[in-house]
Amino acid sequence: MDIARQTPLLRFSNINTYYGPIHILQDVNLTIYPGELICLLGGNASGKSTTLKTALGLVKPTSGTVEFRGEEVSRRPTSYRI
């Protein structure tokens, strides 16, 4: 199937996440399609764990949207996403 026609499994659009005054994720855009294998690489304090926590809803983004299978889930609880 042509990847351009597939609905992304997970999409971050302009995600900004803070821990207090510290800007952790800055305008993150990420699209993952079904069947893809993704690896987050980076040094300490580069936002890898925060990216995953934002996807799960454990950390709320200040702005931007998280979509799962085409549904905007940014305001949904972690239990709904899982």
Image: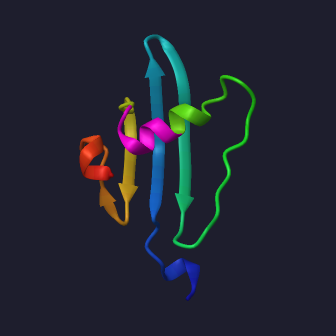
Give above or below for 10 relative to 36: above
Give above or below for 59 relative to 15: above
Most foreground residue, 76 or 61:
76
Q: Give the magenta range.
A: 52-58
The residue positioned 60% from the left and 31% from the top of the image is 47
If the image is split into quadrants, where does the N terminus sit?
A: bottom right
The residue positioned 39% from the left and 49% from the top of the image is 66
Give above or below for 30 relative to 9: above
The residue positioned 45% from the left and 65% from the top of the image is 9
- Secondary structure mostly seen in the magenta stretch: helix
Q: Quadrant of residue 70?
A: bottom left
Image position of 78 (left or right of 59): left
Image coordinates for residue 19, horizontal then vertical, percent: 46, 17
The residue positioned 64% from the left and 63% from the top of the image is 37
Image coordinates for residue 68, horizontal then vertical, percent: 37, 59
Q: Say whether residue 53 is magenta.
A: yes
Most foreground residue, 49 or 75:
49
Image position of 25 (left or right of 43): left
Image position of 14 (left or right of 77): right
Task: Check the image and name the residue furthest to the right.
Answer: 43
Task: Check the image and name the residue furthest to the bottom.
Answer: 1
Q: How many marks?
A: 0
Q: Say whether residue 38 is magenta.
A: no
Most foreground residue, 41 or 16:
41
Image position of 37 (left or right of 11): right
Image coordinates for residue 26, horizontal then vertical, percent: 55, 32
Image coordinates for residue 48, horizontal then vertical, percent: 61, 36
